[in-house]
Image (cartoon, rainbow, N blue to C red):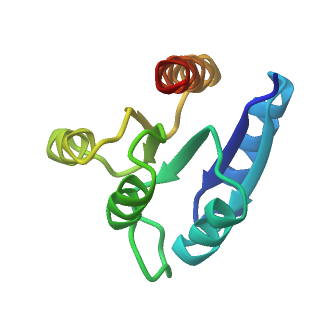
């Protein structure tokens, strides 16, 4: 079964790069450039995983606020944060708010694939436990 992944980043080149990598691994991807597009995409079709930039320039909500909103609506949804400007405090904050992982830009392809695979496996286990 193909996993559905939503990629949320304000940088078009990052969205397309991540989407291409994950499509190459057999996943179905959609992208959003800001919090409003992301919320609309999730309402339209709940993904199995969200990859979410922390900063989201020009967005109504930043990545951490969007993380809170998504976790309130879908507590079981795995969310991997992506940041080019993170520090230990940001990473701890994201994890406390329910992020599955945090990947720093520039990231290695293997790191992205591994984090996505582990988050998706966790999602499958949680879905199975609920059935």
* Residue drawn at (58%, 21%) of the image: 124
| Rendering coords of residue 81 (x, y %) | 43, 44
Q: Quarter of the image for the N terminus: give it.
A: top right
| Rendering coords of residue 125 (x, y %) | 51, 17
Apparent side of residue 94 relative to residue 126 in the rendered image (left or right): left
State which quadrant residue 121 falls in. top right
* Residue drawn at (64%, 72%) of the image: 40
Q: Quarter of the image for the C terminus: give it.
A: top right
Is residue 30 depicted above or below 105 in this figure?
Answer: below
Give the camera-side residue of 53 and 50.
50
Is residue 32 depicted above or below 123 in this figure?
Answer: below
Apparent side of residue 27 relative to residue 113 in the rendered image (left or right): right
| Rendering coords of residue 83 (x, y %) | 42, 48
Is residue 102 depicted above or below 53 in this figure?
Answer: above
The number of numbered discs placed on residues in the rendered structure image is 0
* Residue drawn at (25%, 38%) of the image: 95
Q: Residue furthest left?
A: 89
Apparent side of residue 11 relative to residue 12 in the rendered image (left or right): left
* Residue drawn at (24%, 48%) of the image: 97
| Rendering coords of residue 114 (x, y %) | 56, 16
Q: Residue furthest front?
A: 131
């Amino acid at each position: 079964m193909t996993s559905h992944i939503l990629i949320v980043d304000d940088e078009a080149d990052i969205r397309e790069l991540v989407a291409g990598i994950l499509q190459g691994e057999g996943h179905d991807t959609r992208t959003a450039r800001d919090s409003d597009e992301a919320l609309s995409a999730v309402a339209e079709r709940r993904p199995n995983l969200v990859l979410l930039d922390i900063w989201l320039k020009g967005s109504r909500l930043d990545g951490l606020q969007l993380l809170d909103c998504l976790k309130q609506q879908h507590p079981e949804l795995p969310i991997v944060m992506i940041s080019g400007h993170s520090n230990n405090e940001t990473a701890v904050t994201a994890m406390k708010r329910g992020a599955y992982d945090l990947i720093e830009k520039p990231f290695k392809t293997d790191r992205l694939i591994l984090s996505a695979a582990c988050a998706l496996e966790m999602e499958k286990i949680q879905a199975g436990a609920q059935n």
